[in-house]
Image (tube, rainbow, N blue to C red):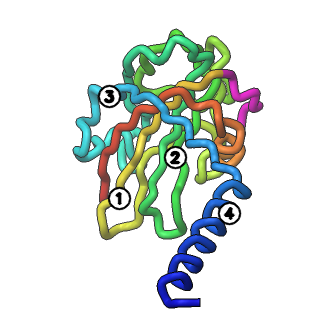
Amino acid sequence: MGSGRLLRWFWLTSLLFLCACTLASPTPSPSPVTAQLALSSSAIAPGATIPREHTCDGADRSPPLAWAEPPPDTASLALLVEDPDAPGGTFTHWLLYELPAHTRSLVAGIPPLDTLPEGARQGRNDFGTVGYRGPCPPPGRTHRYIFRLYALDRPTGLAPGATRNQFLQVIKGHVLATGELVGFYSR
């Protein structure tokens, strides 16, 4: 066999092998794209320092929050507040779920109750309590605090006191939109 024929034979076999492999392996379905929700606070400007009142060094009150209209198919809303810079890994400061879809804001100082009016439920934070517990980093570097709002296509069905991991597991594939507000705090 001449070198030209050998080269063509090599390329043809490689092409057939490549086509066979492509046909044999299923194409993964694309990840669902979620819409964005505008999330804001009259107490925390995006990228600014979280006021002392909303930290363990102050009154440790949850900040007021407001958000835009979620997608029309929203069945419930949820809020997760985390510190991704904590020494032991991501630290949960607040988990609030089963907020009715018509809710557009939260007042400051949500009480640490298992269940709130209109059926909203609070999960367990990493301090081991239910409800909001504000920034309380060890002395040293500045930490980020991410307030993330989720618009869900169904209620979570979680009982009060659920953990972050339980929450994240239950919402997989059910997030229609998210909103995020990041504040900073150091001691």
Question: Which stretch is magenta?
Answer: 154-162
Residue 129 is labelled as none
Looking at the rendered structure, the kind of residue marked 1 is: His
Residue linked to disc 2 = 93
Residue linked to disc 1 = 143
Q: Quadrant of residue 159?
A: top right
Residue linked to disc 3 = 40
Residue ID at (42%, 62%): 85
Viewer-proximal residue among 156 and 17: 17
Of labels 4 and 3, earlier in sequence is 4
Looking at the rendered structure, the kind of residue marked 4 is: Cys
Residue ID at (57%, 80%): 10
Residue 21 is labelled as 4
Place of residue 107 in the rendered image (x, y in percent of width and height, measured from the top left): 42, 20
60 left or right, relative to 159: left
Of labels 4 and 1, earlier in sequence is 4
Q: Quadrant of residue 100?
A: top right
CA gap, disc 1 and disc 3: 19 Å
Looking at the rendered structure, the kind of residue marked 2 is: His
Looking at the rendered structure, the kind of residue marked 3 is: Ser
CA gap, disc 2 and disc 1: 13 Å
Place of residue 110 in the rendered image (x, y in percent of width and height, measured from the top left): 50, 26
Of labels 4 and 2, earlier in sequence is 4
